[in-house]
């Protein structure tokens, strides 16, 4: 049964695994970093649980076999590789570019709330020639707290002068669900993301969708 969101004013989106499929570039940088530390490559199924958790958590997860490494050095290594490989096979998920255009035509407010650094979000959107300009882009480095904290979502609502009950958050991870719940915002779990519907089994969002066409605006 479709979900009618015509009454909502502000549409907030996670980025990696929700709006844009960035898996290939992230996995490439993960395995480059692991190779540097003498670790075998991971496939995406093994790596995906660490993606979307923030850069520090990702590095801790993929280098768990190497306790005591220099986190700053590992971060720099990963980042330098990712800066030149993040566009590998990158694309909007099916239907998302058209959905964004429909939202804009309906005069909805649009925002991104991600645990990825803001400048990377901007660069990728420019690379993809995003069909819309977002009203707000919040990255991991925008505020003192990031998802699953409610702060980024509440900041988006305050900045765009929208009460939380008139906003909706789309995301593919438990971080998105918890952030939405903590902020009192309707939260949609996107099962096309990096981990499928698995993150939503233990802590369900308000709604889980398999395809963006399930949404009525």
Image (cartoon, grey):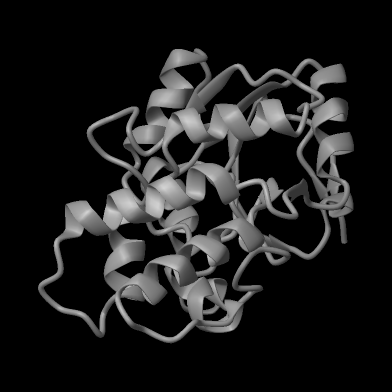
Quarter containing the N terminus = bottom right
The x and y percentages for residue 34 are: 38, 74
Q: Quadrant of residue 135?
A: top right
190 to the left or right of 26:
right
Residue closer to the observer: 152 or 46: 46
Residue 29 seen from this side: yes
188 to the left or right of 214:
left
Report the number of discs. Answer: 0
Residue 187, above or below 143: below
Residue closer to the observer: 187 or 98: 98
Residue closer to the observer: 99 or 168: 99
Residue drawn at the location 64% of the way across and 74% of the way down: 197
The x and y percentages for residue 51 are: 47, 63
Residue drawn at the location 49% of the way across and 76% of the way down: 47
Residue 187 seen from this side: no
172 to the left or right of 131:
left
Residue 96, above or below 55: above
202 to the left or right of 20:
left
The x and y percentages for residue 88 are: 69, 53
Residue drawn at the location 30% of the way across and 48% of the way down: 76
Residue drawn at the location 21% of the way across and 80% of the way down: 66
Residue 74, above or below 198: above
The x and y percentages for residue 130 are: 76, 28
Quarter containing the C terminus = top right
Q: Quadrant of residue 158?
A: top left
Residue 16, above or below 36: above
């Amino acid at each position: 049964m479709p979900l009618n969101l015509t009454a909502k004013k502000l549409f907030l989106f996670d980025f990696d695994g929700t709006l844009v499929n960035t898996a290939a570039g992230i996995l490439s940088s993960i395995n480059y970093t692991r190779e540097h530390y003498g670790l075998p490559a991971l496939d995406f199924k093994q790596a995906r649980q660490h993606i979307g958790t923030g850069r520090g958590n990702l590095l801790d997860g993929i280098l768990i076999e190497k306790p005591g490494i220099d986190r700053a050095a590992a971060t720099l290594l990963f980042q330098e590789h990712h800066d030149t490989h993040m566009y590998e096979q990158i694309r909007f998920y099916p239907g998302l570019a058209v959905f964004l255009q429909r939202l804009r035509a309906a005069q909805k407010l649009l925002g991104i709330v991600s645990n990825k650094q803001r400048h990377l979000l901007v660069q990728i959107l420019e690379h993809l020639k995003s069909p819309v300009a977002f009203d707000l882009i919040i990255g991991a480095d925008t505020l003192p707290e990031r998802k699953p904290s409610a702060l980024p979502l509440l900041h988006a609502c305050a900045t765009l002068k929208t009460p939380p009950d008139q906003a909706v958050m789309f995301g593919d991870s438990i971080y998105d669900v918890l952030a939405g719940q903590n902020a009192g915002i309707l939260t949609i779990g996107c099962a096309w993301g990096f981990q499928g519907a698995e993150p939503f089994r233990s802590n369900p969002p308000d709604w889980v969708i398999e395809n963006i066409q399930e949404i009525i605006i």
